[in-house]
Image (cartoon, helix red, strand yellow):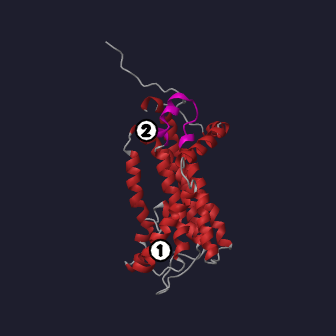
Amino acid sequence: MAAPETLVRTSEPPTLRVVRRIRTLWAHREVLVNLTRKELKVKYKSSVLGVAWSMLNPLLYLLVFYVVFTYILPNGIPDFSVFLLSGLLAWTFFSTGLQAATSSVVANGPLVTKVAFPREILPLSATGSSLVNLGFQSLVLLAAMLVFAYPFFGPQLLLLPLALFVLIVFTVAMGLLTSALNVRYRDMSHLVELALLAWFWVTPVIYPAGLVLDKSLDEGGLLIFRLYQMNPMVQIVMGFQRALYGYRTLEEGGGRILPDPGLAWYAVRLSIVGVAALALLYVAWRMFFRRSGDFAEEL
């Protein structure tokens, strides 16, 4: 009688040691940089405009939504272009980074099966390329602010590093989770794409979060808004908007665009989401690490 076939881990020990693993990743930082550079080169290979395409994406969103919500379905948000771009920066990084990270291990299958290196580098490089694109897309928002002479200097900018840190941690955590699952369940990339379509509309990118708060109060309480805030991207996008757009009111009726004028209100909520994102990162990293030793056999 033949012995049952067993699946043997080929490259990684079974238990994650965070500090030791960080040292390993640091030792392979050149691999991370090279793979990030490769992600950008492949994306814009044979392209005339190159990285300029990353700036055309938010410009197209801006044009379409500006026409729709200014002339067809006016929403009364003053300086709507700045409001839209400030939230769109965070959302575009999250959506493109998560989709790229989800397929990163499968897309680099030949590399995984032939070369020994920390597998976390693959989703990290995908997120890193999205971070580079975020830098270029920020130039679009900066140009819009300068063109419209929009006042953006002030203490509210202190929220931006915190919001960006939370955004990166949350995106990396989700990317590690989905990329590991996508190796075994190839439907994961399609599921992520569909989830992001719905996720976009429950995140205050093109409509003000203050509108959701007012609707919740009209219903007799804050239950709806509290449930709404359980979406981590709500807090992150509002953090970007409060830091870059500021606290404004609607042109008609004086309704609020953002829930609270105080910076501490946003800092506290971003900190809570940040702690939760770090916890999710640890769980996702452990799961990724546990599965990573079998990637070569499963690809």
Q: Using a 10 Å C-alpha cutoff, classify the residue at mark 2 as few (fewer than 14 neighbours), some (14 to 19) or many (20 or more).
A: many
Name which quarter of the figure residue 261 lies in.
bottom right
Q: Which residues are magenta?
A: 104-122
Q: Which mark is residue 102?
A: none
**Alpha carbons under labels 1 and 2: distance apart:** 39 Å
- Residue closer to the observer: 221 or 261: 261
Q: Horizontal and vertical percent for residue 237?
A: 53, 65
1 or 2: mark nearer the eye: 1
Q: Which amino acid, by three-letter code, is at mark 2?
A: Val
Q: Percent x, y for residue 166?
A: 57, 57
Majority SS type along the magenta span: helix
Relative to 260, 7 lies left or right: left
Residue of label 1: 66
Vertical placement of 10 versus 176: above or below?
Answer: above
Q: Is residue 63 above or below residue 2?
A: below
Residue 183: assigned label: 2
Q: Pick the quarter of the image with the N terminus.
A: top left
Q: Nearer the viewer, residue 37 or 9?
A: 37
